[in-house]
Image: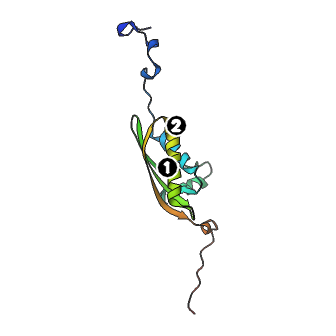
Amino acid sequence: MTALAGGATGADEPAATRGRTSIADAVVVKVAGVAAREIPGVHAMGGGLSRTIGAVRDRVPGGRSNVGRGVKVEVGERQTAIDLDLVVEYGVPIADLARDVRENVIDAVERITGLEVVEVNVTINDVHLPEDEDGAPETTTSRVA
């Protein structure tokens, strides 16, 4: 055992001062992505192109869904900032949904990582309509003969 200045040994030092913990951006991305998806009314995450690529990846055998789709983060030593891109279900009050997502993401990230979440910015990119599920082409009827 190596003696430290003043005769103290390493075992006498608090565990928090005997090393460093780093949390990768990818960890915060995954935690935030899962937490955002837990809120009812969130249909999907990501912008149009990332959702399209993700849909193709999800259909490929052996492909994994990307829980980080639609999540961007900045991670410092003690704090993080998070940006979310969401698609919401039609009829869900967007302001309430954004508040619920923000609260759930902050709670999950702070609880799991110990980082202080300084902001969660929520962007609603699209609204999912029930008829989008049918896969049937839209038919339009002429209003004039």
Q: In 3D space, how far apart are the residues under numbered discs 2 and 1 (Cα atoms)? A: 14 Å
**Label 2: which residue?**
111
Which element type, helix, strand or loop, lies under badge 2?
helix
Q: Tag 1: Cα neighbours inside 10 Å, few (<14), some, or many (≥20)?
A: many
Could you tell me which quadrant the C terminus lies in? bottom right
Tell me which residue sits at (57%, 51%) in the image: 39
| Above or below, 47 relative to 68 | below
Q: Residue at x 42, y 26 (%)?
A: 20
Q: In the picture provided, is 137 more to the left or to the right than 68?
A: right
Q: Work out whether residue 139 or residue 75 is closer to the camera in this orientation and state it.
A: 75
Q: Residue 97's spot in the image, x, y percent?
A: 53, 56
Residue 31 appears in view = yes
Q: Is residue 126 above or below residue 38?
A: below
Which of the two labelled residues, at mark 2 and mark 1, occupies the earlier sequence position?
Answer: 1
Q: Say what amino acid the circle numbered 2 marks.
A: Arg
User: According to the image, label 1 marks what residue?
Assistant: 102
Viewer-proximal residue among 108 and 66: 108
